[in-house]
Image (tube, grey):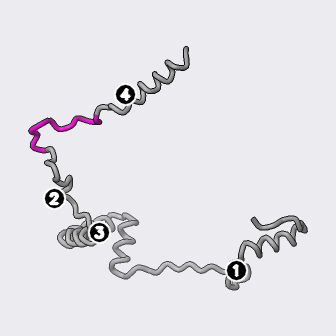
């Protein structure tokens, strides 16, 4: 196959991929559900601002608080461990999680942050390789 025909074929593929049809079925003319020019796609949807979203969620939770508490109690009574823990946390307060890290004999752990040059120097002395240098 001549080299000229290969490049023509490649150009043909590139041109055809640039003219691909749109994905899905676009709205036809006159469709009442199609967006008008300049119209937002989320005109009456969920608020976009985070503070508005948090307030919206809090408002909705407060509106249905009695139903939520009743559902939580029913699941806890039926034996759901997750719901039992959540109910106890709400009634008695959550027990704080405490994690304590100690050294070998219960002493505190010390963290030393060293500079790269100091680490290379110490490694060089340990390995007894004076030719090692920093980059």
Q: Check disc 4 and report its element: helix, strand or loop.
A: helix
> For this view, does 66 lie left or right of residue 83?
left
What kind of element bears circle 1? loop
Please name whichever residue, 86 or 64, is drawn nearer the observer in this view of the structure: 64
Q: Is residue 29 magenta?
A: yes
- Magenta segment range? 22-33
Image coordinates of residue 13 in percent, x first then y, are 42, 26
Viewer-nearest residue: 118 or 57: 118
Instruction: Please tell me which of labels 3 and 1 falls first in the chain.
Output: 3
For marks 1 and 2, the one nearer the N-term is 2
| 125 up-or-down from 22: above or below | below
Q: Name the residue under label 4.
A: 16
Q: Is residue 86 magenta?
A: no
Q: Which of marks 4 and 1 is nearer the N terminus?
A: 4
Looking at the rendering, which quadrant does residue 104 occupy? Answer: bottom right
Q: Can residue 66 be seen in this view?
A: no
Disc 3 secondary structure class: helix
Disc 4 and disc 2 in contact, CB within 8 angstroms: no
How packed mark 1 is, by other alpha carbons closer than 10 Å (few <14, some 14-19, many 20 or more), is few
Dot 2 and dot 3 residues touching (CB under 8 Å): no
Q: Horizontally, is 93 left or right of 37 in the view?
A: right
Instruction: Read off the residue under disc 2.
Output: 44
User: Which residue does the image show at 24% across and 70% down from the upper left?
Assistant: 52
N-term-proximal mark, 4 vs 3: 4
User: Which residue is disc 1 drawn over?
Assistant: 112
Q: How crowded is the residue under tag 3: few (<14 C-alpha within 10 Å), some, or many (20+)?
A: few
Magenta part, dominant SS: loop
Is mark 4 in CB contact (under 8 Å) with mark 1? no
When asked about the image quadrant of residue 12, the answer is top left
Q: Which numbered tag is attached to residue 126? A: none
Residue 18 seen in this snapshot? yes
């Amino acid at each position: 196959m001549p080299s000229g025909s290969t490049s023509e074929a490649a150009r043909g593929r590139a041109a055809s991929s640039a003219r691909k049809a749109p994905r899905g079925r676009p709205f036809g003319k006159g469709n009442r559900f199609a967006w008008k020019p300049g119209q937002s796609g989320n005109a009456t949807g969920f608020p976009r601002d985070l503070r508005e979203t948090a307030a919206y969620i809090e408002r909705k939770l407060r509106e249905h608080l009695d139903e939520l508490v009743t559902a939580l109690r029913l699941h806890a009574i039926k034996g759901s461990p997750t719901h039992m823990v959540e109910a106890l946390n709400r009634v008695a307060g959550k027990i704080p999680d405490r994690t304590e890290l100690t050294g070998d004999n219960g002493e505190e752990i010390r963290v030393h942050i060293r500079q790269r040059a100091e680490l290379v120097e110490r490694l060089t002395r340990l390995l007894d390789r004076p030719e090692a240098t920093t980059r």
